[in-house]
Image (cartoon, rainbow, N blue to C red):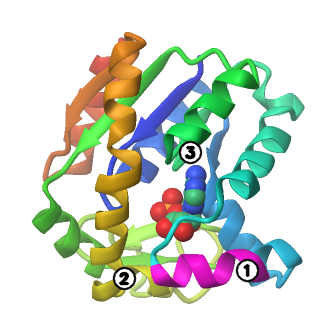
Amino acid sequence: MTIIFLGAPGAGKGTQAERISEKLAIPTISTGAILREAIQEETSLGKLAKSYMEQGALVPDDVVIGILRDRISREDCGKGYILDGFPRTLVQARALKNMGAKIDKVVNIHVPDEKIIERMSGRRVCLECGSSYHVRYKPPRMENQCDKCGAALQIRKDDLPEVVKNRLAVYHEMTAPLEAYYAKEGLLVNVEGQEELADTTKLTQKALMIE
Ligand code: AMP
């Protein structure tokens, strides 16, 4: 099964993608996580992506399309995969189609902007292994320490309030049009993001008919 998660930054699509990925035993591909890793490793891709990401802007289409093309051609994607954070523009959506990707469903997680700003201020990430937490909604077992690898948790620079506002504006302008694009293809299912992550997971599973 191949699934795309759409939704504003901070809508919780990453967490839902991880859960569905475990349930279906298929990989989640997060272009954001791939780019953060490149920044951490100071590769040429990382150097290029850094300035865009720190401002809350999108990394150029050709760059992310190239990353995605390489990633989905790997063997572990043979039985399907989940896309978290790609596509983010119509150009990327069309490129994905041209790569021959057969998408089964597009899950659009909707959360109002005010709620997103509140959520993102509490988000913490592990830069070592990519795990993500929230001080209120998904706290780590030990304060400020990653459950999976024990590293100290950090606030992403792009989760700072002024950057979040910019990311939301970019989302509404560049990514929200994908809702209509995938609705027209008959693939879109809408899920209202709930206060409790587990409730959103139930709704997501129902929408995907994998309860
Ligand atoms: P995310 O972790 O998905 O919220 O992504 C973090 C940041 O990485 C975004 O704000 C963008 O700067 C960049 N990014 C991730 N995926 C894409 C994409 N598909 N297209 C352009 N930029 C992206």
The residue under the point 15% across, 46% down is 194
Tell me the distance, in whole angstroms, between the alpha carbons under discs 2 and 3: 19 Å
Where 161 falls versus 2 (above or below)? below
Q: Nearer the viewer, mark 1 or mark 2?
A: 2
Of the two numbered discs 2 and 3 on the same chain, state the one appearing first in sequence: 3
Q: To which quarter of the image does residue 140 belong? A: bottom left
Label annotation for residue 86: 3
The answer to whether any part of residue 110 appears in the image is yes
The x and y percentages for residue 74 are 87, 35
What crowding class fits label 1: few (fewer than 14 Cα within 10 Å), some (14-19), or many (20 or more)? Answer: some
View quadrant of ligand 1: bottom right
Tell me the distance, in whole angstroms, between the alpha carbons under discs 1 and 3: 18 Å
Is residue 101 found inside the magenta-colored segment of the image?
Answer: no
The residue under the point 20% across, 44% down is 193
For this view, does 72 lie left or right of residue 182? right
Tell me the distance, in whole angstroms, between the alpha carbons under discs 1 and 2: 18 Å
Question: What's the magenta region?
Answer: 47-55
Label annotation for residue 163: 2
Q: Which residue is tagged 1?
A: 39
Helix, strand or loop under label 3 = loop
The x and y percentages for residue 171 are 35, 57
What crowding class fits label 2: few (fewer than 14 Cα within 10 Å), some (14-19), or many (20 or more)? Answer: some
Is residue 49 found inside the magenta-colored segment of the image?
Answer: yes
The residue under the point 72% across, 23% down is 98
For this view, does 34 lie left or right of residue 78? left
- Is ligand 1 closer than 8 angstroms to the Cβ of mark 3? yes
Q: Nearer the viewer, residue 66 or 205?
A: 66
